[in-house]
């Protein structure tokens, strides 16, 4: 299971990358694998103020629907419009082109309190192979 | 890892099933209870998934009412489906991804539960590329649709035992035009098992595949007193 070490993680399987005061958020490799091939992604509106842990997006595969949560409080700065036509990018490149939205955190230091890669890796099951 | 399996004897209206699942989901999130799996039948109902569309229903709402079939929207993934007596429904309320055996993915695991259960009764069921659920040469035998809220699952799988398949003529199952729906009874005739027998096998395979050791209860008989409010 791919868990990049430079990112922060949540218990609900989102990842967070902080760059110049803006946090990019997506779902982890584990999360996309659990859901299967995505068919639809519902994203928030740019400018929305969101609370930490609030529901901000929904991802759907052929048979599953999953809520996505804001890892920290802030303002939605950008959404990944490519996902409207290509939701499968979340499966093929969850940590790259499959990012979901960007958020300007109210307090960027809150991101340091999220899980690091080791802590997140401890939380997810071992692969059976 | 321990979990509860709770069997229902009488068919349950769909809305009641949702209410109980939501209560269990809240209790599971708060770590007041372990993972739970419900095994039940529904009274007749057509349900539309999160993005299910009304054009997947072939008849009017009035016609459904006249037939005694409810119509409900469900927060699960997937399209339109039909539930009724003679179909074994499995609703696992599971926390996914906390050091447990979910390595293949939850959807794959649910399909595996259905495939092995069909196998127990001599029916070869299999996956089809791009079409979820469990399929036989005669059509789809198990449908899957679930929801993850804070990575605790809701909804799940339905497995056709001796359900009246005419119910599926009211809809375009899963939005797939021209695909057949089958049942154990249609495949096995008089040798078809009861819903209770199938429920027991589903619980058995669920326990093995999803790595949960089950404490089994019957909702109207031996439910411990402290659990009763969750099922009231």
Image (cartoon, coloured by chain):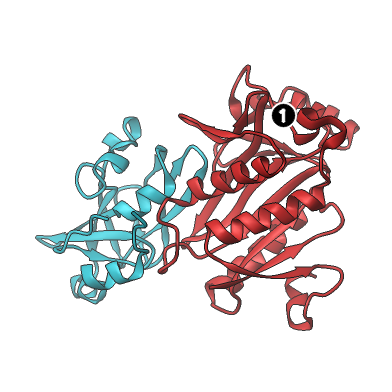
Residue depicted at 48% across the width and 52% down the height? B106
Pointer 1 residue: B182
**Residue A82 screen position, x and y as percent:** 27, 35
Do we see residue B13 in this rendering?
no
Relative to A129, say whether B171 is above or below: above
Relative to B211, say whether B163 is above or below: above
Relative to B214, say whether A2 is above or below: above
Please identify the quadrant where the C terminus of chain B is shown: bottom right
Residue depicted at 71% across the width and 49% down the height? B89
Chain that appears cyan: A
Do we see residue A49 in this rendering?
yes
Q: For residue B136, what is the image quadrant?
A: top right
Query: Left or right: where does residue A57 sit relative to residue A93?
Result: right
**Residue B129 screen position, x and y as percent:** 46, 29
Q: Residue furthest bottom?
A: B226
Q: Chain of mark 1?
A: B
Colour in which chain B is drawn: red
Label 1 sits on a secondary structure element that is loop
């Amino acid at each position: 299971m791919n868990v990049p070490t430079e990112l922060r993680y949540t218990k609900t399987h989102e990842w967070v990358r902080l760059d110049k005061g803006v946090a990019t958020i997506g779902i982890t490799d584990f999360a996309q694998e659990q859901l299967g091939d995505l068919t639809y992604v519902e994203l928030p509106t740019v400018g929305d103020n969101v609370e930490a842990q609030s529901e901000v997006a929904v991802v759907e595969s052929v048979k599953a629907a999953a809520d996505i949560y804001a890892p920290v409080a802030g303002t939605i700065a950008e959404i990944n419009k490519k996902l409207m036509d290509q939701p499968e990018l979340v499966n093929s490149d969850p940590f790259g082109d499959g990012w979901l939205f960007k958020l300007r955190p109210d307090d960027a230091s809150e991101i340091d309190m999220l899980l690091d890669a080791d802590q997140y890796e401890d939380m997810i099951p071992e692969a059976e192979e | 890892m321990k979990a509860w399996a709770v069997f229902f004897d009488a068919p349950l209206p769909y809305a009641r099933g949702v209410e109980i699942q939501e209560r269990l989901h809240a209790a599971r999130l708060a770590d007041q209870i372990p993972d739970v799996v419900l095994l039940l039948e529904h009274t007749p109902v057509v349900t539309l998934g999160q993005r299910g569309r009304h054009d997947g229903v072939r008849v009017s709402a009035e016609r459904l009412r006249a037939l005694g079939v409810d119509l409900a929207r469900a927060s699960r993934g997937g399209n339109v489906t039909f539930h009724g007596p003679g179909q074994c429904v499995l609703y696992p309320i599971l926390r996914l991804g906390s050091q447990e055996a979910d390595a293949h993915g939850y959807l794959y695991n649910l399909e595996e539960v259905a495939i092995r259960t069909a196998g127990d009764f001599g029916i070869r069921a299999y996956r089809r590329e791009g079409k979820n659920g469990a399929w036989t040469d005669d059509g789809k035998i198990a449908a899957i649709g679930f929801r993850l809220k804070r990575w605790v699952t809701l909804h799940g799988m339905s497995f056709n035992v001796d359900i009246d398949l005419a119910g599926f003529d009211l809809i375009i199952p899963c939005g797939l035009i021209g695909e057949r729906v089958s049942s154990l009874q249609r495949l096995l005739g008089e040798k078809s098992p009861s819903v209770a027998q199938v429920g027991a096998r589903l619980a058995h395979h669920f326990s093995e595949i999803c790595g949960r050791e089950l404490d089994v209860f019957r909702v109207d008989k031996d439910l411990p007193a402290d659990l009763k409010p969750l099922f009231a």
